[in-house]
């Protein structure tokens, strides 16, 4: 199908904006409706593996994004209590040569800002802020009509729900999802790099494991900031929001008995920049599209963060969705093709992420087996190429780029 369909996207996060850029590149008229009044992202880092960075390159975002990134040479695995090094993983050039794209660390705000600027440049009126998706007024084979907080009723050929974990589009299509506290609380913060001792800066990317906790650190924003994230077992429910303030004291208590490096790292985070949130699980969906609407990213497959693939999957979804429109004859065929191409992978990575949580953050000492966990690389997930993977369309021609 060649452009130009009217494609409405609810949610201007990483998945929604990537989809907008990939669809716009094919000549479709995209409009992105974002609930937030002001654009921005939380202060946290992301690891992007080659299955996502190849997409960002194909969308022409690399020149703007590259100066903000950190491309680590290696990362370490350490024992949380002794601080002892357990393993070193080679990244950098060898990994990039093997997969044909880089492995990198990025500040969420740097990535989001780059996606926003690209969309503003290529489709100046596409992004509408303070404009939450409220309801689906019509959804049939001829198209959709949605109700939005600011724009009112808007008609389109297709609606894409990219509105995150607590997706309103998902509820409108498939009913409310049951949520279950997964038994983990996550803390996040960014520490100025110069506040850290040389020992922590020398090999800045490090995952530290032990019973009940996983502590991650890696540099973002061209190395100016150290991203710190701790995922800890907790019997106590915590809010599923990224912006609940936390204290140094509670995180230090969670990490009691850990090597002194953990406390040094935690104390380097400015008090006002430490946050926590509860991790929740939802039932996997058996379908991602209905009539002229479909889900993408966390809205389709909200996953626990134990493989670091949530945003990467949203980026994969976005480009496969755009390719599905290019390689089929009707919107209905495109959404069916997209779901057939992506649902099994999205659900499988969600399941594997939950499983890896048990291996990475055991409940107690008796379950602690260093080295028993997986990674996106050891599971072969990062070899997936969303730009070229064969789509399940009868007679489809596989293209080289979105
Ligand atoms: C601790 C932690 C670490 C992580 N680390 C990694 C990592 O290293 N690598 C990785 O790939 N992933 C990681 N992730 C996962 C990643 O953050 C998410 O999977 C990713 O942000 C999903 O993108 P999205 O666009 O689907 O949703 P979001 O980024 O949540 O965007 C959704 C957007 O929709 C908007 N919205 C919500 N409701 C509405 C509405 N009704 N109408 C309009 N707009 C709406 C929101 O304001 C938001 O802008 C991590 C997650 C956690 C919790």
Image (spheres, grey):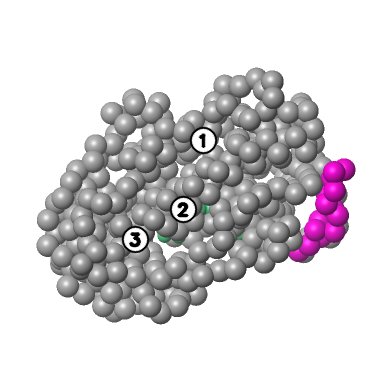
Mark 3 element type: helix
**Cα–Cα gap, marks 1 and 3:** 32 Å
Instruction: Say whether residue 238 is visible.
Output: yes
Q: Position of residue 70 (x, y in %)?
A: 35, 42
Vertical order, 122 against 13 (above or below): above
Magenta-highlighted residues = 131-147
Residue at numbered disc 2:
351
Q: Position of residue 401 (x, y in %)?
A: 58, 25
As drawn, is 351 to the left or to the right of 372?
right
Closer to the N terminus: mark 1 or mark 3? 1
Closer to the N terminus: mark 2 or mark 1? 1
Which secondary structure dominates the residues rendered in magenta? Answer: strand
Vertical order, 390 against 314 (above or below): above
Residue at numbered disc 1:
56
Q: Nearer the viewer, residue 91 or 282?
A: 282
Q: Residue drawn at (42%, 39%), measured in percent from left and top?
A: 381
**Cα–Cα gap, marks 2 and 1:** 26 Å
Q: Contact, CB < 8 Å: mark 2 with mark 1? A: no
**Mark 1, residues whose alpha carbon is within 10 Å: few (<14), some, or many (≥20)?**
some
Residue at numbered disc 3:
358
Q: Is residue 135 magenta?
A: yes
- Quadrant in which ligand 1 is drawn: bottom right
**Mark 3, residues whose alpha carbon is within 10 Å: few (<14), some, or many (≥20)?**
some
As drawn, is 394 to the left or to the right of 364?
right
Q: Position of residue 329 (x, y in %)?
A: 78, 28
* Residue 326, image quadrant: top right
Q: Nearer the viewer, residue 356 or 244?
A: 356
Q: Position of residue 34 (x, y in %)?
A: 67, 56
* Residue 316, image quadrant: top right
């Amino acid at each position: 199908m060649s452009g130009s369909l009217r494609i409405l996207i609810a949610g201007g996060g990483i998945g929604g904006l990537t989809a907008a850029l990939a669809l716009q590149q094919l000549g479709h008229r995209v409009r992105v409706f974002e609930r937030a009044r002001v654009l921005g992202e939380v202060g946290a880092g992301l690891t992007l593996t080659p299955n996502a960075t190849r997409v960002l390159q194909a969308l022409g975002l690399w020149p703007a994004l590259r100066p903000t990134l950190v491309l680590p040479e290696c990362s370490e695995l350490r024992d949380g209590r002794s601080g002892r090094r357990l393993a070193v993983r080679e990244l950098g050039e060898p990994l990039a040569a093997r997969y044909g794209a880089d492995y990198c660390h990025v500040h969420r705000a740097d990535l989001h800002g780059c996606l926003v600027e690209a969309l503003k440049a290529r489709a100046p009126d596409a992004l509408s802020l303070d404009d939450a998706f409220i309801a689906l007024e019509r959804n049939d084979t001829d198209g959709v009509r949605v109700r939005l907080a600011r724009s009112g009723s808007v008609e389109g050929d297709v609606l894409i729900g990219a509105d995150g974990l607590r997706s309103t589009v998902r509820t409108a299509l498939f009913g409310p999802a049951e949520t279950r506290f997964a038994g983990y609380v996550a803390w996040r913060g960014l520490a100025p790099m110069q506040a850290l001792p040389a020992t922590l800066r020398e090999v800045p990317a490090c995952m530290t494991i032990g019973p009940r906790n996983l502590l991650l650190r890696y540099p973002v924003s061209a190395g100016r900031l150290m991203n710190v994230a701790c995922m800890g077992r907790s019997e106590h429910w915590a809010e599923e929001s990224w912006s609940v303030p936390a204290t140094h004291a509670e995180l230090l208590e969670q990490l009691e008995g850990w090597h002194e490096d953990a406390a040094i790292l935690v104390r380097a985070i400015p008090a006002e920049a430490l946050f926590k949130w509860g991790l929740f699980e939802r039932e996997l969906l058996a379908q991602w599209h209905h009539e002229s609407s479909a889900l993408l990213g966390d809205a389709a497959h909200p996953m626990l963060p134990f493989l670091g693939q949530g945003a990467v999957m949203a980026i994969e979804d976005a480009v496969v969705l755009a390719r599905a429109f290019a390689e089929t004859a009707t919107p209905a065929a495109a959404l069916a093709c997209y779901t057939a191409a992506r649902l099994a992978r999205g659900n499988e990575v969600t399941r594997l992420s939950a499983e890896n949580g048990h291996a990475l953050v055991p409940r107690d000492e008796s379950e602690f087996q260093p080295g028993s966990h997986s990674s996106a690389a050891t599971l072969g997930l990062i070899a997936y190429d969303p730009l070229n993977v064969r789509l399940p369309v009868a007679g489809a021609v596989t293209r080289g780029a979105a």
